[in-house]
Image: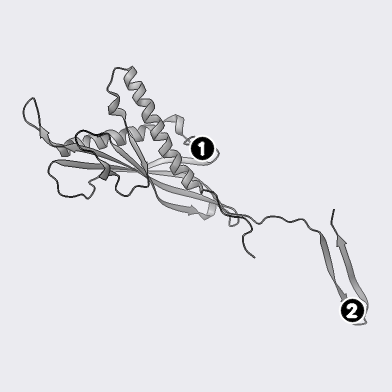
């Protein structure tokens, strides 16, 4: 017996990952509008959002291009809670979704005197980006990530700062900040498709003295 239906759906974890990326893109754009209305520089609220990129910092620009922080949303791992699941259809799942925020900085002379440290600037940009990400995803509006009835709970596991491996360069600097995001939800698996019973046959059995015990066919065809 094989599975009767084509498995052509997304798993819930993929839907959740895509939703997180969409939330960050939409809310960052909305924050830029609010910043403009408040007389602030909207570029300080800009995020460039990607999904499942291996080295998103490689797209960081030259001095004439966009230096906004890059955010990469990617699915890290899933664990399954057998005690809160069933073995037939539903598996309670806890997924770890990583949101990596990359800041770009370039060492330069300060027009007012002194030196602008690219590494420090990159760290400040990355930290500004992860601050924005944390506040968006933990806002009350996104208690269930806009997927109420699908998502059980969301929370932050940890935030860590790191430096991506890159070619030696004492002018350009990149610093990353990783927000590890925990989301709980149900995953579902294919089920047996029911079929209409058309005919029920019962075997004929005889006792030792050749008496017929049961012999019957039941036609359920409508």
Residue 118 position in % (x across, y down): 15, 37
- 118, 178: nearer the viewer: 118
Residue 3 position in % (x across, y down): 62, 60
Please indicate whether residue 8 sits to the left or right of residue 179 in the image: right
Work out which residue is located at the far left of the displayed protein and give it. 113
Quarter of the image for residue 86 reads bottom right
Q: Earlier in the sequence, mark 1 or mark 2?
A: 1
Residue 6 position in % (x across, y down): 59, 55
| Circle 2: element type | loop
Q: Is residue 128 above or below residue 160?
A: above
Q: Residues within 10 Å of mark 2 (few under 14, many from 20)?
A: few
Quarter of the image for residue 215 reads bottom right
Question: Residue at 32% across / 17% down in the picture?
Answer: 38
Please indicate whether residue 164 sits to the left or right of residue 21 in the image: left
- 90, 27: nearer the viewer: 27
User: How far apart are the two marked residues, 1 and 2, measured between alpha carbons?
Assistant: 63 Å
Please indicate whether residue 192 sits to the left or right of residue 129 in the image: right
Inspect this view and state whether residue 93 appears.
Answer: yes
Q: The N terminus lies in which quarter of the figure?
A: bottom right
Label disc, if present, on residue 147 of the rendered structure: 1
Label disc, if present, on residue 8 of the rendered structure: none
Residue 130 position in % (x across, y down): 31, 36
Q: Which residue is mark 2?
A: 207
């Amino acid at each position: 017996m094989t599975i009767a239906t084509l498995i052509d759906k997304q798993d819930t974890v993929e839907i959740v990952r895509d939703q997180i990326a969409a939330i960050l893109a939409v809310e960052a754009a909305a924050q830029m509008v609010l910043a403009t209305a408040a007389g602030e520089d909207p570029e300080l609220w800009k995020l460039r959002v990607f999904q499942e990129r291996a080295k998103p910092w490689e797209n960081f620009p030259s001095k004439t291009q966009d230096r906004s922080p890059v955010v990469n949303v990617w699915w890290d791992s899933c664990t399954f809670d057998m005690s809160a699941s069933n073995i037939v259809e539903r598996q309670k799942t806890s997924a770890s979704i990583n949101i990596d925020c990359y800041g770009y900085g370039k060492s330069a002379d300060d027009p007012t005197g002194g030196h602008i440290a690219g590494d420090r600037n990159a760290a400040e940009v990355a930290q500004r980006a992860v601050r924005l990400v944390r506040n968006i995803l933990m806002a009350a509006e996104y208690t269930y990530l806009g997927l109420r009835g699908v998502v059980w709970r969301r929370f932050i596991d940890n935030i860590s700062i790191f430096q991506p491996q890159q070619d030696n360069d004492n002018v350009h600097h990149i610093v990353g900040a990783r927000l590890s995001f925990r989301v709980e939800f149900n995953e579902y698996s294919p089920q047996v498709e029911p079929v209409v019973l058309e005919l029920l046959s019962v075997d004929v059995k005889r006792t030792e003295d050749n008496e017929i015990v049961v012999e019957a066919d039941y036609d359920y065809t409508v």
